[in-house]
Image (cartoon, rainbow, N blue to C red):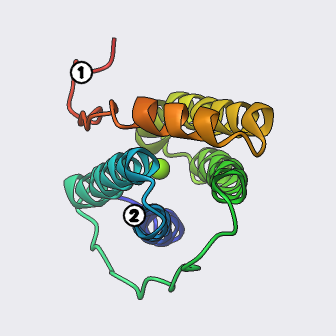
Amino acid sequence: MLTDKMREALNKQVNAELFSAYLYMAMSADFTDKNLAGFANWMKVQAQEEVTHAMKFYNYILDRGGRADLMAIDQPQAKWDTPLAAFEEAFKHEQKVTAMINNLVELARVEKDPATESMLKWFIDEQVEEEANADENVQKLKMIGNDTSATFFMDQEMKQRTFVDETQENSKE
Ligand code: MG
């Protein structure tokens, strides 16, 4: 059984992952509005990934005999001035999520819950990737600056991203 504290914190994380999905959907919608279909695609795939993160926490709570309490999801911002501004926020957001995962690990140790600590390992590794991906896009967009043809080229490249559910076992290399 999960302790009350652990269960509450994991439920909060379900909400945080769903907010991440909402935030990236908002970014995707804003990119679509600005005719940047590739950036919109990248963010939509990112949102899909976040839903699988929420489900991984949700399923884990249930597997441990806990109750999943679903809380209201905050409304995300709707518009960003530039692709760089959106990706800078995405990067900042992922750093925040990493800190939340680290806090969950701390709590699992305090609560003497090695099963939760073990489950969280997947998320620790995932966050390294998430931060790296967001930062890579920030760096590219900084290089591009106001160059519209380079922005167009990057938009084309971002169209290539497809959704893979990495929470399914053995799908990670
Ligand atoms: Mg996530």
Q: Which residue is mark 1?
A: 171
Determine whether 79 is above or below 113 in the image: below
Q: Nearer the viewer, residue 152 or 171?
A: 152
- Say which of marks 2 and 1 sits in front: 2
Few, some or many residues within 10 Å of mark 2 (<14, 14–19, 20+): some
Most extreme residue toward the top, as rendered?
Answer: 173
Question: Which kind of residue does numbered mark 2 sit on?
Answer: Thr
Q: Which residue is mark 2?
A: 32
Task: Check the picture and name the quadrant holding the C terminus.
Answer: top left
Residue shown at 27% from the left, 34% from the top: 162
**In the depicted structure, whether residue 94 falls above or below residue 136:** below
143 displayed left or right of 71: right
Q: CA distance from mark 2 to mark 1?
A: 30 Å
171 vs 139, left or right, is: left
Q: Residue 58 location, x and y as percent?
A: 29, 60
Q: Position of residue 151 (x, y in %)?
A: 60, 40
Sequence-earlier tag: 2 or 1 = 2
Element at label 2: helix
Secondary element under disc 1, as helix, strand or loop, is: loop
Say if disc 1 is inside 8 Å of ligand 1.
no
Residue drawn 37% across the image and 56% down it: 47
Q: Amino acid at mark 1?
A: Ser
How crowded pointer 1 is (Cα within 10 Å; few <14, some 14-19, many 20+) is rated as few
Residue at image point 47% right, 40% down? 155
